[in-house]
Image: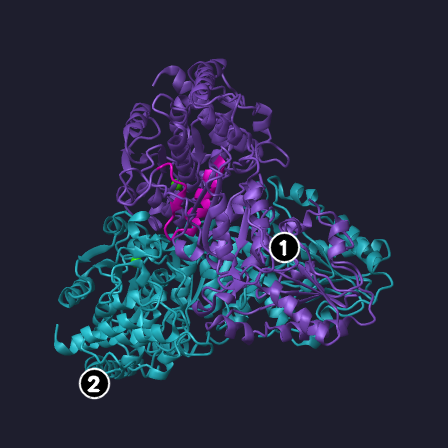
Chain colours: A purple, B cyan
Amino acid sequence: MSDIEERAISTIKLLSVDQVAKANSGHPGAPLGLATVAHAIWKQMRFNPKNPDWINRDRFVLSNGHAVALLYSLLHLFGYPLTIDDLKNFRQLGSKTPGHPEAETPGIEVTTGPLGQGISNAVGLAIAQKQFAARYNKPDFTLSDNYTYVILGDGCLQEGVASEACSLAGHLQLNNLIAFYDDNHITIDGNTNVSFTEDVNKRFEAYGWEVQWIKDGNNDLNAINKALEQAKKSNKPTLIRLTTIIGYGSLQQGSHSVHGSPLKADDIKQLKEKLGFNPEENFVVPQEVYDYYNKETIQPGQKLEEEWNALFKSYSEKYPEQAKEITRRLSGELPSGWEEKLPSYTKDDKALATRKLSEMLLDSIFDYIPELIGGSADLTGSNLTRSKEATDFQPDDAPAEGNYAGRYIRYGVREHGMGAIMNGISAFGANYKAYGGTFLNFVSYAAGAVRLSALSGHPVVWVATHDSIGLGEDGPTHQPIETLAHFRATPNLKVWRPADGNEVSAAYKVALGSKHTPSIIALSRQNLPQLEGSSVAKAEKGGYVVKEAADAQVILVATGSEVSLAIEGAEALAAKGVSARVVSLPDQHTFDQQSKEYRLSVLPDGIPIVSIEVLTTTGWAKYSHEQFGIDRFGASGKASDVYKFFEFTADGVADRALKTIEFYKGSKIVSPLNKAFYSVV
Amino acid sequence: MSDIEERAISTIKLLSVDQVAKANSGHPGAPLGLATVAHAIWKQMRFNPKNPDWINRDRFVLSNGHAVALLYSLLHLFGYPLTIDDLKNFRQLGSKTPGHPEAETPGIEVTTGPLGQGISNAVGLAIAQKQFAARYNKPDFTLSDNYTYVILGDGCLQEGVASEACSLAGHLQLNNLIAFYDDNHITIDGNTNVSFTEDVNKRFEAYGWEVQWIKDGNNDLNAINKALEQAKKSNKPTLIRLTTIIGYGSLQQGSHSVHGSPLKADDIKQLKEKLGFNPEENFVVPQEVYDYYNKETIQPGQKLEEEWNALFKSYSEKYPEQAKEITRRLSGELPSGWEEKLPSYTKDDKALATRKLSEMLLDSIFDYIPELIGGSADLTGSNLTRSKEATDFQPDDAPAEGNYAGRYIRYGVREHGMGAIMNGISAFGANYKAYGGTFLNFVSYAAGAVRLSALSGHPVVWVATHDSIGLGEDGPTHQPIETLAHFRATPNLKVWRPADGNEVSAAYKVALGSKHTPSIIALSRQNLPQLEGSSVAKAEKGGYVVKEAADAQVILVATGSEVSLAIEGAEALAAKGVSARVVSLPDQHTFDQQSKEYRLSVLPDGIPIVSIEVLTTTGWAKYSHEQFGIDRFGASGKASDVYKFFEFTADGVADRALKTIEFYKGSKIVSPLNKAFYSVV
Ligand SMILES: [Ca+2]
Ligand SMILES: [Ca+2]
């Protein structure tokens, strides 16, 4: 190791330690153990800190996100807009340096911290690169050949989501993925031997990865450099196991006490002395370290981007159509006119399951939107997520048909992995719109990833079929009850439950048009009629009057399969001389974004409102005075029998409506949209 | 294979096929592929169908629960109370034979269907057996030595939850666990080679399992029997990979079309002919098959239980204390007087984090309740879940300290696996009360298992610390927002958020006393004062008036850390001459079970109610007219700064209260507990 490299590595260590010490909060152990490998990775990475969005940059993912101080040190030293003052504000409210990596920070590819997500996102980043390259590279033009580098810890390897994603990465032969496993034998519980004694190398070999092992990860820079070279030659993803000592150089090194608590002042002093720094100074960066990274990495990175731009210019001359498509995608705009491809329906069109309508929609847009990249966690034939136009995404020599230009991913029965991989595909850029199918009830398996889609603003789409007791015989293990309430309560997440074909089109129109909001589209197994009162334009407001009634005495607000039921209920009421408006509210999140005037025109003061949905009533009081739902688990039986059992029939609806009218008779009725105060946002 | 065994296996196949055909719904493929191994396993299993609760019975778990028709056939043939008429009612509403296995059916150990759960439950069943044996067996008395058998499919192996549980099973050397992997190369997506080409054998060897492989799983009964013998001699858990042909014998065998759709009438006929049955008859069981299983399995099983009862009788003489404890546990009662061990507090006791109060509580009850078996998904030092009295649950020759009599499980960073394992421990019986710790936000990783705890009625307890923005610097990736709404919307699930020490005691009192309802106890990272108005007796009602006020103009209803804040808010209001009652509502589920009279005494008509909780407002309209919460993601910073940022201060509370009073001035105010109608339950 050269002197300057040693100096640089020491600077990374001390900047990280100083951040944690100043904040008196954070994780100093991992940065000390990982500074050497981080230096090695970043030094040779291709990126331009002046343009963090350059599409052919190498990506870096810190899957053990609690080591974020390390990442902030790197971003600062490698020229990203993060100042020493920002580092001094580590973990303070409103700073650019929050407690875990957040994707909005320039140079941070994905939000990490919840363990297992980062490495799984990285699989998505690698998939997107392969697909992008397969679609656009030409024999004489390599537009895309970047790598995705990952550091992950023991915790990430224990999480099931990572197991799912890494097994798929092996199957897909993602040799653009290079992961370093920080084998430091420590988690918060102490020595990993209390729970984690599996042979990680062998497990990853079983997945189809190349595995290397560096025994002195704290010091053996030469071995790390060689491992990187070798990994780039592999035809598989590579895991480089790096045995390190957590908190290396601290008096507490090798113990779990150095994992999540700041080092003591004395300890920091001895460490600085040991590393040849002034023990009385903090946040010091020797000028030669700045100069070194500038010369070794930043300048070459800028040059690489310039060369890429020149390459793209000549590509544009030779392949104008492709270049135009790339340019459009990089601008974040979908192909113009794509909305016109969305089907629309009239009441005379035949009754179909919304999952089937979703399939028909995908068939009509799949070829028109090249950034659409679908898939399913098995269940393709049930979710109906595979367009007739689709080719599977598979390596060329896979046992199954497909190629890397394919846009349909066979995720296997791996819902959580699929969610995290979709986040990674979205994070790659190039306007990728990832969608993935499973049964609605099993989106919950992926709750950890769905939450991060919403938090990071990845506009991925879940095609969530079999959305209620309407799935029938599979019974309560498969029938969602709490599911929509859960996801509706998640900030920045759209949860569509379309009632017919027009509403399916509206759901996809808004979902695919979203730049920073993910969506779950809940779809029926059973056939539903095409509604007379629906249209794409109305439904894309999130809620609208689907059946008007003069002098309405009650409003029935419903979603999905219950909208046509509510209309039947209104007809039953009409037969008794009672006038009922029916409102379809396919997505609360979208409805909430409409003007208050519009919302109050749909759900006004003065009329009692009953919500109707064959799921939990939780959450519906935001839009209704009374709630008709199912606050218990479902039942196995024919769908029609199960609906009857829970009294979801025209008469059952009418009965609740009449009780509601009676209950509110003579009261001043305020719309639930009118509140005494509103949330801080 | 003897003629009678062949006949028996054919009977299993045809009973299964007939069920699916009659229901015109279900999965015939797996039962046809698995009838031989199912016969082999069940024939040698030790159980008494007349007493499905015998504690030393062998357990069987069908992890690929969609093959449930197979299980119903077995239950019928092996003497459990499931008649041919029950089989004819397969998948009909109200039948004893729903679409997936449900644990309430005698002979079904755990509810399965959601993939990956069954094998993970089985790990829990095996852990419980080891712990039970280590505590009670004596050199001269083997009270517990049962095995847990599992059949699982490709889907289970792809799910992360199974990876987590199986890695831990290897670490724990659970040689009482014998799993058959149905390697049929088929999932719903078709050939498994589209997504699942990993080397499963090698992966399980890496986990520390013994792996065997039977190449002709459809026919090689001899190999299956030998494999079972060998597995029982292993000092590790065993995976027996069984290569089979799905739908074996059907004209569609080996294809995914036979996975999830009934066989056609012609196909069934040819199959019956091929197997020597009358093609015109359905649901046929030859008397010699009944007789055979009766002689080979049922009679010996009854005898084994009788011998065990005799053994236990002489054990009781030699070890009366232990026998008394076992008898008590088998009756499902906790040790008398255990509630008196729960700490109580007065307002002069010091402010502490509820996670710390939880630790103190565990310290005081852990030794008194031998069926309490704790653990944590890493984070022990943060969750404070390990009683000082605890020994780790570890195999004798593990690298870490502990033994099988230990009652603290180091789950590793495996939340979903922990949840599913806890369900298995609970399903073992012997009154096991499993609790597991993680951060509240990461209970969501285990949503799939939590849902099954609730559906199956396993009274497990989640110790869910760091329950809000009050965790501070770790930021939005760790701060729950939607989490409690999600779990409160789940049927049969208690979600406690205690405000102080007395409420922590109430939460554990109700949670551990529950026989069929799981609980999540959400606990603060930060210190909270001991409340003057709290008591265990009040809090165990789920909700109560913690601070009364004469002629209250407003009611503030809060949970956890916001109860003391609401009290401060009430004091700020009092200073302005406004009278406010404060209600603490630590568990909605428990509160809902109180009489309506009591509930209305807490939240009466006539006074506007504001809820106060630093989480989503979703769900709170059930108990309040107005909601003060956080309907966005949190922020990284010092906890006190973050609270201020979201206006959760005494003044912020008072402000919302005043706006609420103003808004409702002059209106008739109906308690949200009074509804026009109530849910069907
Ligand atoms: Ca570690
Ligand atoms: Ca299979």
Checking the image for residue B350, the label placed there is 1
Query: Looking at the picture, does residue B336 appear above or below residue A346?
Result: below
Mark 1 burial class by Cα count in 10 Å: few <14, some 14-19, many 20+: few
Residue B93 drawn at (x, y percent) = 47, 76
Percent x, y for residue B187? 33, 56
Q: Nearer the viewer, residue A284 or B108?
A: B108
- Disc 1 marks which amino acid? Lys
The residue identified by callout 2 is: B291
Asked if disc 1 is less than 8 Å from ligand 1, the answer is no
Query: For the residue labelled by badge 1, is the local secondary structure a helix, a strand or a loop?
Result: loop
> If you read the primary sequence from the N terminus, does the residue marked by circle 2 or circle 1 appear first?
2
Position of the C terminus of chain A, as image quadrant, is top right
Q: CA distance from mark 2 to mark 1?
A: 69 Å
Q: Is residue B531 visible?
A: no
Give coordinates of residue A278: x percent, y percent: 49, 19
Region rendered in magenta: A404-427
Judge depth for marks 2 and 1 and give the one in front. Answer: 2
